[in-house]
Image (cartoon, coloured by chain):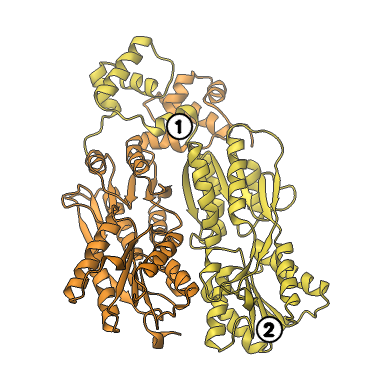
Chain colours: A orange, B yellow
Amino acid sequence: MTEEPTITTIAQRAGVSIASVSRVLNGLPTRADTERRVLDAARELGYAPNSAARSLKSRRSNQVGFAIADIGNPAYLAMIREIQPLIKAAGYRLVLHSTDTDTADEIEVLRGLGERYIDGLIMVPLRMTPEHLEMFAAARAPIVVIGGAPDGTPVDNVRTDSRTGVRLAVEHLHAIGRRRIGFVNGPTDTVPGAARSAAYAEALAALGLPHDPRLAEVGDFYRADGARATARLLRRAPDVDALLCANDLIAAGALDVLRAAGRRVPEDVAVAGMDDTDLATLTWPALTSVSLGSAERGRVAAELLLDRLRGGEGPPRVVTVRPHLVVRASTAGEEAR
Amino acid sequence: MTEEPTITTIAQRAGVSIASVSRVLNGLPTRADTERRVLDAARELGYAPNSAARSLKSRRSNQVGFAIADIGNPAYLAMIREIQPLIKAAGYRLVLHSTDTDTADEIEVLRGLGERYIDGLIMVPLRMTPEHLEMFAAARAPIVVIGGAPDGTPVDNVRTDSRTGVRLAVEHLHAIGRRRIGFVNGPTDTVPGAARSAAYAEALAALGLPHDPRLAEVGDFYRADGARATARLLRRAPDVDALLCANDLIAAGALDVLRAAGRRVPEDVAVAGMDDTDLATLTWPALTSVSLGSAERGRVAAELLLDRLRGGEGPPRVVTVRPHLVVRASTAGEEAR
C-alpha cells in the first residue's frame, strides 16, 4: 500500500484551509481560484476520486442489493446469474446479503436502505412479517420483492404461481399411474412452504385422491433435511409410490434415501422436484422438476428495479411468471438418456 | 417512498447555512451550538445517518469485495459460503464481482479500489498479467489473492498445490490398474489450466507412463465444454480407460458423454474430477474428486483480509492449503453407496 493523500496534505499543497478542501471535494460552492488550486493539488498528489464523496454529492451509491436466505441454494444462483450482468451493464455493483434464513437479518437489510449504501434492493423474503411491510412502506429507495407478497404490498413484486406448479406435478404423477403420492415439504411457516402445502392438498382433492397425512412430511429446504424427512415418510407409509419434493435439494436427499433403501426410481417410487435447478440434470436418474422460472424472475426483478432507478413512476407492479413441468427420467423411465 | 430530508431542509429548520450543515454532517470542527442545532433538526426531520457521509468521515466503506470469474462455479460458491459470514460478523458487507472470465474486467475491479467503495478485496484471478501485478503494488487497500501468484506478488496469497492434487489423482487411477489415463483440461493460458497440464505430464512421467498427446484435451471449465472435449478425446483415443478432469463441471460433462456412448463408469472408464464440489455427490456414479480445499481457502483469505483491515502489518503472506483425494464410486465400484 502506498501513502494516501489526505485532506490535510492537499490543503498544505494548495495553500488553502482544510475547510476549503472539504468544500471543494464535497462539491459545495467555492471561489473559482480556490477550487482550481485544490483540484490541482489533489491531482498532483495522486488523490483518487472518492466514491463516498461523490455519492454524497450525487446521493447515489451506484450499488444494488440482493438479499437471499441462502447462497447455497441453486434457485437463488439462477437469479444472481441474471441480475448481476443486467445491473452491471446499467452501472451498478451488486451487494450480496445472505441472511441465513434469519428474518431479523432481513429486517436489518431493509433498515440499511435508510443509510443509502445501496440505491435499490431486490429481496427474496422467506417469511413476510408485518415489520417487512412497514419497512417497505417507509423505504426511501426502490425495492423489488421476489416471491409471494400480500395484496397491497407497497413495492414491485415478481412472483410465481407455485400452486399451479404443484398441481402440474401431482397431475403428472397421477397420469403415470401413481395413487400414493407423497409430499416432502420445507417449513410450512415460510411463504413457499405454506403455498406448496395448500396446493398439494388442493391438487389431491381435484383428482379425487384422499389426503392421507402419513404421506406428507416437513423438513427444511436442504438436502440432508430432505433425506431425513423422506426416511420418516418411508417408515410411516412404505406403500408410497411417488414423491413430490418442495425443491430440488430435498429431491436429491430423497434419491439418496430411496437408493439406500433399495427402492428403484422411478419404477418403485417416482420422484419430482421443484425449481428445475442445475441440480436436476446432475442427479441420476435426472430429476423431473417444476420450473418456477427462477432465471426469469431474476431478470424481471432486475428490469423492474432498473426502471425505478431511472425514475420510473407509478403504482407497485405485480408480475407473475408461469410455471411449467420439465419431465425427466425420475418419473419416466423411457425418457432417461 | 417518503420525502427525504436534504441538507437544504435541515439548514432551513436549524436556521444555519447549508455549509454549516455540511460541516457538521461531515464531522468537521463546528461551533458547539451550531452542531447541536443541526443535529436536532436532522433528528426531527428523520434524517438517517448517511453511509456515504460517514464513510467519508471514517474513510471506510464497511464493504469487502470478492471478485470471481463465474458465479455459477460451485468452487467459488464454497468460498463465498465461508467468506460471507466471516466478513459479516466483522461488520462488513460483501460486494460481489463476477468478471465473466474477462481480464479487463478484473483490472477494472482493481482500479475501483482507488475509489474506496470497498475497504479490501479478495480476488480469484483466472489469469495473472503484468497489469494485475502493477495494480496490486499501487493498491491503497489490502488485497488477498486466491490462486497461484508469482513469487514476490506484493499482496497476501492463499494458494493450493494443484500439482500435488493432480499427482494424487493420477496415482490413484494407476493404482486401480488404469494405463491409458486421459486428461480433460480447461484453457492452458489460465493459471489453473497451465498448472494442471504441467502436473499431468509430470505425474505420468513419474509413473513411467508415456505422454500420449491424443489423451489430452482442452475445453473450458464448464460442463458443456467438458462434454465436447471428452467426445473429441473418445474419438481420437477410444482405448482410454480413465479420465482426469480439471474440475467437477468438466467431469459431469464427461459422465454425460460416456453414458451416451455406452461406456460404463468406472468399469470401462474411471472418471475423476477436481475441486470436490457439491456436484461430486450429486452425479451418478458419485465422483471421485481432488479436494483443493475451496472452503478452507475462502476462510483463510477472509481471515488474512480481516487481519489487514484491523491494521495487521508485515510483508505479504503466502498460505498453501494441501489437497487431498476423495474417492467415490466413479473410480471404485465397491465404494458406491
Across and down, in percent, residue B282 comes to 51, 69
User: Mark 1 Cα within 10 Å, few/some/many (few <14, many 20+)?
Assistant: many
Q: Amino acid at mark 1?
A: Ser
- In this rendering, does residue B171 appear at all? yes
Tag nearer the camera, 2 or 1? 2
Q: Nearer the viewer, residue B48 or A35?
A: B48
Q: Amino acid at mark 2?
A: Asp
Q: Tell me, for residue B89, which label it has, or none.
A: none
Q: Nearer the viewer, residue A22 or B54?
A: B54
Across and down, in percent, residue B259 comes to 54, 84
| Residue found at x 54% / y 29% | A41
Chain letter of mark 1 equals B
Q: Which residue is mark 1?
A: B55
Chain letter of mark 2 equals B
Q: Which residue is mark 2?
A: B241
Across and down, in percent, residue B237 comes to 68, 87
The secondary structure type at the circle numbered 1 is: helix
Cα separation between marks 2 and 1 = 59 Å
Decide if residue B253 is on the left or right side of residue A72: right
Q: Nearer the viewer, residue B258 or A250?
A: A250
Across and down, in percent, residue B93 comes to 46, 42
Q: Is residue A331 above or below residue B141?
A: below
Query: Looking at the rendering, in which quadrant would you find the N terminus of chain A?
Result: top right
- In this rendering, does residue A292 appear at all? no
- Counting residues from the start of the chain, the first of labels 2 and 1 encountered is 1
Q: Nearer the viewer, residue B218 or B291?
A: B291
Tell me whether circle 2 and circle 1 mark residues in contact (CB < 8 Å): no
On the same chain: label 2 and label 1? yes
| Residue found at x 49% / y 20% | A18
